[in-house]
């Protein structure tokens, strides 16, 4: 590797660690560590939500899918953009208001318990377990993406790549908590955005322009240019179903909770959706242009054994100046880091606030809980590394499973909690369990109808069960109904 590329990359890593140290100095209590004291401005909230959402999937999984199968894989991008917009439009402001009104809730399980006055703590327990299980899988996907980056770009072994990437991410998450994670995600989001714009332009320009690029792809494989070629109804619904996941993603909706004011939501929505749509276009065009480039230019790459998920890495090295290559590689690591750090933080909050304080030491001080949270970051990261240790691990497969788990378990509960006064604790518990279990069983029963992405049946079954059990249950106490109306009135009048 060129020394200029390596130096640029090292400078980036040093900058991320510096932010972690600054975040450590600004973190004085539990609210700071988990929610940044609700001080996020619209720009930081929007880009950190987007960066933590997209992960290595945006720069590795999605371009790899387009490289391998063409525009038929773009349906996922349509589903994601739609789901993200609806989440910002209908959930963000209400959740920011309601979590503050409901005893200043600082985690998703905390909100559920306060929202339903659940003195049995069963909602906290079930939701915390869902977070820990599925985020460990999700974190493993990031470890896999990071390992592939280091293996491809720096001639390291897969195992060395996992440990180096994990060490940097764990360090600044361990030290700085929510403040460090949000600010690193903000800068990483900017870096990812420019990488996704620059690299496709370089590739398309190298091929002679947009029309020539499309002609090359069409000559190689006409089906690559057709969004519906070889794609059935189940496949399209499965791709669009990714949008349902947004309503239940703890590492995304916690950014809504951490905003300084619900009045900033409109500006944050515009920034976040603009960033996302342009980023998705960039990832799509990187995959398509990469397919054309590697298929027609003599690069010495064995196309028969090529891992399509590293196409962005390969293009970065082939098409750009060493310094720019270092920045583009840093952007790929940014995509990985920006999601893993958020997942580790939310998982650690589930361990410390929802399990340790909720069931082991209810008298635990803030200082003690921050220590527990930091230790849990280490433990969860080690388990994720173990899960990702096989070089055969797929970023796309791991992400899709975890995404379905959260969307199906939490999505309907979040929506109904914000918009339906009649939902009860028993309905929420039953729906959450049904959603999570459906994802697991549906995933294991592949074939025929079961090829439908498991988030769809999980989300629908959760919604149905939650509504039916709530209607069969007695009405929520007047105190809960009054709080619901208070949050709703604030949202309506602002």
Image (cartoon, rainbow, N blue to C red):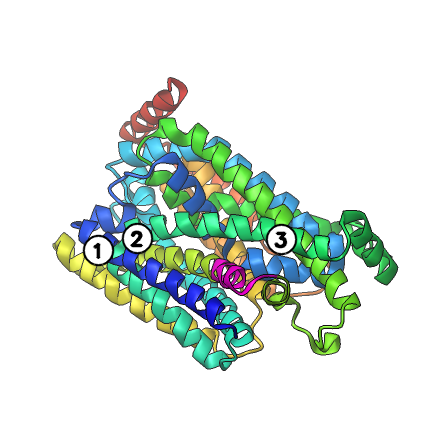
Q: In the structure shown, which secondary structural element does the residue marked by tag 1 occupy?
A: helix
Label 2 or label 1, whichever comes before in sequence order = 1
Say if the magenta span includes residue 57: no
Residue 301 image point, x, y percent = 70, 76
Q: What's the mark number on residue 67?
A: none
Disc 3 crowd rating (10 Å Cα; few below 14, some 14-19, many 20+) is many
Secondary structure at badge 3 equals helix
Q: Is any atom of residue 257 visible in this view? A: yes
In the rendered view, does 418 fall on the left or right side of 434?
Answer: left
Task: Between residue 280 and residue 359, name the one nearer to us.
Answer: 280
Numbered disc 2: secondary structure: helix
What span is in magenta? 320-332
For image coordinates 31% across by 37% down, the residue present is 99
**In the image, is residue 411 above or below residue 161?**
above
Dot 1 or dot 3: first in sequence order is 1
Q: Is residue 17 above or below residue 84?
A: below
Q: Is residue 263 left or right of residue 189?
A: left
340 vs 57, left or right, is left
Tell whether position 321 is magenta: yes
- The answer to whether the residue labelled 3 contacts the one labelled 2, judged by CB atoms less than 8 Å apart, is no
In the rendered image, which residue does mark 2 sit on?
Answer: 180
Q: Residue at x 12, y 54 (%)?
A: 365
How many residues crowd around disc 1 within 10 Å: few (fewer than 14), some, or many (20 or more)? many
Mark earlier in primary sequence (3, 2): 2
Q: Which residue is mark 1?
A: 24
The image quadrant that residue 222 belongs to is bottom right
Contact, mark 2 vs mark 1 (Cβ under 8 Å):
yes
- Label 3 near label 1: C-beta < 8 Å? no
Q: Name the residue rendered at 34%, 36% in the picture.
A: 41
**Residue corresponding to mark 3:** 283
User: What is the x, y in percent for residue 337?
Assistant: 42, 60
For the residues marked 2 and 1, what is the alpha-carbon distance in whole angstroms? 8 Å
């Amino acid at each position: 590797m060129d020394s200029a590329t390596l130096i640029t990359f090292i400078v980036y890593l040093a900058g991320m660690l510096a932010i972690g140290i600054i975040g450590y100095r600004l973190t004085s209590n539990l609210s700071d560590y988990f929610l940044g004291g609700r001080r996020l401005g619209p720009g930081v909230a929007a880009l950190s939500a987007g960066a933590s959402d997209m992960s290595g999937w945006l720069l590795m999984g999605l371009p790899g899918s387009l490289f391998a199968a063409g525009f038929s894989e773009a349906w996922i991008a349509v589903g994601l953009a739609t789901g993200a917009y609806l989440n910002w439009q209908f959930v963000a402001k209400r959740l920011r208001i309601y979590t503050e009104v409901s005893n200043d809730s600082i985690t998703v399980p905390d909100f559920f318990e306060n929202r339903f006055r659940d003195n049995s703590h069963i909602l906290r327990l079930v939701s915390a377990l869902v977070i820990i299980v599925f985020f460990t899988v999700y974190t493993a996907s990031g470890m896999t993406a990071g390992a592939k980056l280091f293996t491809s770009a720096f001639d390291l072994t897969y195992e060395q790549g996992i440990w180096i990437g994990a060490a940097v991410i764990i360090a600044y998450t361990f030290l700085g908590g929510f403040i460090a994670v949000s600010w690193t995600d903000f800068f990483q989001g900017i870096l990812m955005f420019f990488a996704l714009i620059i690299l496709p332009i370089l590739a398309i320009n190298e091929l002679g322009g947009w029309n020539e690029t499309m002609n090359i792809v069409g000559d190689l494989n006409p089906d690559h240019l057709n969004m519906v070629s070889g794609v059935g109804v189940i496949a399209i619904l499965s791709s669009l179903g990714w949008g349902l996941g947004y309503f239940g993603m703890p590492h995304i909706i916690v950014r809504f909770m951490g905003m300084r004011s619900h009045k900033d939501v409109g500006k944050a929505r515009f920034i976040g959706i603009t960033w996302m749509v342009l980023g998705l276009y960039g990832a799509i065009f990187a995959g398509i242009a990469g397919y054309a480039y590697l298929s027609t230019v003599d690069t010495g790459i064995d196309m028969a054994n090529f891992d399509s998920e590293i196409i962005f890495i390969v293009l970065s090295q082939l098409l750009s100046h060493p310094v720019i290559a270092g920045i583009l590689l840093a952007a790929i690591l940014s995509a990985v880091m920006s999601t893993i750090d958020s997942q580790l933080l939310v998982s650690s909050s589930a361990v410390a606030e929802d399990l340790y304080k909720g069931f082991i030491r209810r008298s635990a001080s803030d200082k003690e809980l921050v220590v527990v949270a930091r230790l849990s970051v280490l433990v969860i990261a080690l388990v994720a590394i173990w899960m990702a240790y096989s070089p055969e691990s797929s970023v796309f497969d791991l992400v899709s499973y975890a995404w379905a788990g959260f969307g199906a378990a939490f999505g309907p509960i979040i929506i109904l909690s914000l918009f339906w006064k009649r939902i009860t604790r028993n309905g929420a518990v039953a729906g959450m369990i049904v959603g999570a279990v459906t994802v697991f069983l549906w995933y294991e029963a592949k074939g025929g109808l079961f090829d439908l992405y498991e988030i769809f049946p999980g989300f629908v079954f959760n919604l149905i069960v939650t509504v039916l059990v709530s209607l069969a249950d007695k009405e929520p106490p007047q105190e809960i109904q009054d709080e619901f109306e208070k949050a709703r009135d604030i949202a309506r009048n602002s």
